[in-house]
Image: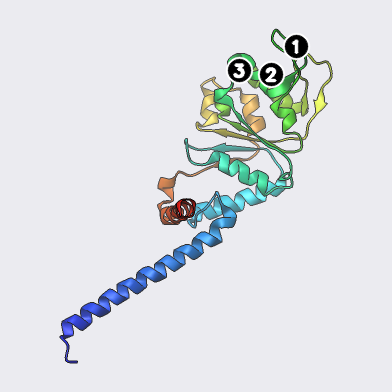
Amino acid sequence: KPYPAERLVSSIQRAMETRRLVIDNRNLRAAVQAAQSDWPLMGQTPVMERLRATLRQLAQADVDVLLEGETGVGKELAARALHSWSGRKQREFVTVDCAALPVGMIESELFGHELGAFNGAVRARTGRLLLADRGTLFLDGVETLPSEAQGKFLRVLEEREVTPLGGNTGRTIDVRFVAASQVDLADAVRQGRFRQDLFHRLDVVRLRIPPLRERRDDIPLLFSHFANQAAERFG
């Protein structure tokens, strides 16, 4: 003392702003830590809380699930959550990128083949369906499956049995199917691009994964998580 009153007010305002930032940072860190158990489906918005709660319920119900959403919204992350929260978590989570399957090798990739089943089959191969036995098979981009492959896959869904190419004996499988599509499969059925019977088999439970623009309030939480990861990685 003496001091100008305006300097005191200015100092207090700066201190309050700094304190607010410290408290906000602490709250955000606490939110990130609390959300770690929900990673990779982090988010505090109501739409994400509902999605996580639904996925946890479905994980225990052990039913096939159809996930719909735009590219990049996290359909595979949701599928992995279904697997890791289920009783199948100790078994394999097998991913099939339907759009990336070579046209001539789709059946071999899915069903496997026996030695000599076709030219070039110099050894037997276990298909993805058998690899996923007692686990989860994630079909990403299921809308891109060719019509012939759709028919053969439909039989697998109905019978839960797989016969490798060149084989004579089918093997019963216990697989949970999680299919993902970036288009509305019901529209694809109406346009004749997807089998109606296969759609109904996959559409036991349908979930839409929301894009980030519909949950903008989760951006600070996600940013803080990735920033912390980067800080740990780069020191």
Q: Answer left or right for 194 relative to 70.
A: right
The quadrant of the picture occupied by the N terminus is: bottom left
Q: CA distance from mark 1 to mark 2?
A: 10 Å
Dot 3 falls on a residue whose secondary structure is: helix
Q: Residue at x 59, y 56 (%)?
A: 37
Are the residues at dot 3 and dot 1 in contact (C-beta closer than 8 Å)?
Answer: no
Toward the viewer: 16 or 163?
Answer: 16
Q: Residue at x 66, y 37 (%)?
A: 204
Give, as a three-letter code, the residue at label 2: Ser
Q: Residue at x 72, y 43 (%)?
A: 62
Query: Residue 160, how many percent across, how many down?
Result: 77, 29
Query: Residue 49, how many percent across, how many down?
Result: 54, 55
- According to the picture, the residue beneath numbered tag 3 turns out to be 147
Are the residues at dot 1 and dot 2 in contact (C-beta closer than 8 Å)?
Answer: yes
Query: Residue 105, how many percent across, how many down?
Result: 64, 16
Dot 1 falls on a residue whose secondary structure is: loop
- According to the picture, the residue beneath numbered tag 2 turns out to be 108
Q: Is residue 184 above or below residue 110?
A: below
Which quadrant of the structure image shows residue 179? Answer: top right
Give, as a three-letter code, the residue at label 1: Ala
Q: Earlier in the sequence, mark 3 or mark 2?
A: 2
Q: Answer left or right for 77 relative to 12.
A: right
Q: Residues within 10 Å of mark 3 (few under 14, many from 20)?
A: some
Q: Residue at x 22, y 81 (%)?
A: 9
Q: Earlier in the sequence, mark 3 or mark 1?
A: 1
Dot 2 falls on a residue whose secondary structure is: helix
